[in-house]
Amino acid sequence: MCYNKFMDNIKYIDAHAHLFDLNCNLNTLNLNNVSKLIIASYKEDNLITTLKLCETNKNYFACLGIHPQYFSDYNEKTKNFIKQNKNKIVGIGEIGLDDRFDNFSLQVDTFEKQLQLAQELNFPIVVHLVGSYSFNKFFEIIKNYNVQGMIHCFSSSLENAKKMLDMGFYLSFAGNLTYKKNVNLQKVATFVPLSNILLETDSPSMSPSGFGRAKNNTPNNIVFVAQTLAQLKNLPLQEIALITNKNATKLFNLDK
């Protein structure tokens, strides 16, 4: 993918990354393309890591939650840890459903418990959804909770996108938006109003096109997601950055 040097002058909010999983020295990591970063936990042993990392930089913000793959990590201990640190976080996540993994009914139970927590604490949710059954179950469940949030790394159909928009959710797009063969996802991103879009890297996963799957994706690569979105929307990069940054600031109350 072509990189234009003037993109260095535009700063983005990366709405979802797992910075602690990057295979590099975080003390020397220069995130010159990122103004703020939302760091999400996904299992018990990186809850503390997420908080400690966000304490090192005023532009890092923590979300705490348990990913569906690690559903058994959510228990009274982890729930209480999140509640005790509610003043240090901006959201509940990464939580959700994934029908690639076994014990789907237990995933659902863990997801609902974390929805209850988000509702109780009045936090937005960061949702991982993979598979048609997961989306269908999500739509069935979510109507019972008064929560808002983002669907991270959205990669589903236009029909599901429309349902999410009707409920007021933000859709977050990552490096897979840049893949030339991902035409359907690009059609979704073209349709979704910019007012409901967030940008993310899902670092260190989901490298943009041209980087190879073995590469260690860093938040700086958010510029390539933004560039693709700008091309799809036929808008300048500055406008993409301005609006998506505003969306992330609003959802996570980053001006607090």
Image: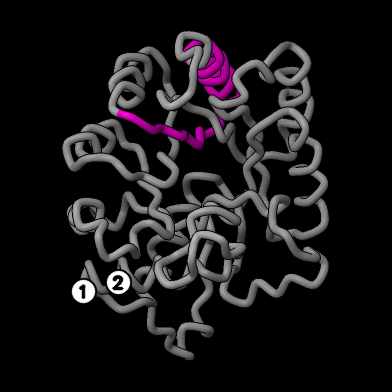
Q: Disc 1 marks which residue?
A: 234
Q: Could you tell me which residue is drawn at 70 percent across and 51 percent down?
A: 21
Q: Residue drawn at (57%, 20%), measured in percent from left and top? A: 114
Residue 72 on the magenta span: no
Classify residue 125 as left or right of residue 24: left
Hey, which quadrant is residue 169 in on the image?
A: top left
| Disc 2 residue type (three-letter) | Ala
User: For the point 72% across and 23% down, which residue is it?
Assistant: 83
**CA gap, disc 2 to disc 1?**
6 Å
SS class of the residue under badge 1?
Answer: loop
Tell me the tag on residue 71: none
Residue for badge 2 = 230
Above or below 128: residue 4: below
Percent from the top left, x then y, of residue 99?
A: 40, 23
Query: Left or right: 233 with respect to 210?
Result: left
Q: Nearer the viewer, residue 109 or 89?
A: 109
Q: Are marks 2 and 1 in contact (CB under 8 Å)?
A: yes
Q: Quadrant of residue 136?
A: top left
What is the secondary structure assignment of the residue under circle 2?
A: helix
Q: Is residue 115 magenta?
A: yes
Q: Is residue 185 above or below residue 137?
A: below
Circle 1: residue type: Asn
Q: What is the magenta range?
A: 108-131
> At 82% across and 67% down in the image, what residue appears?
27
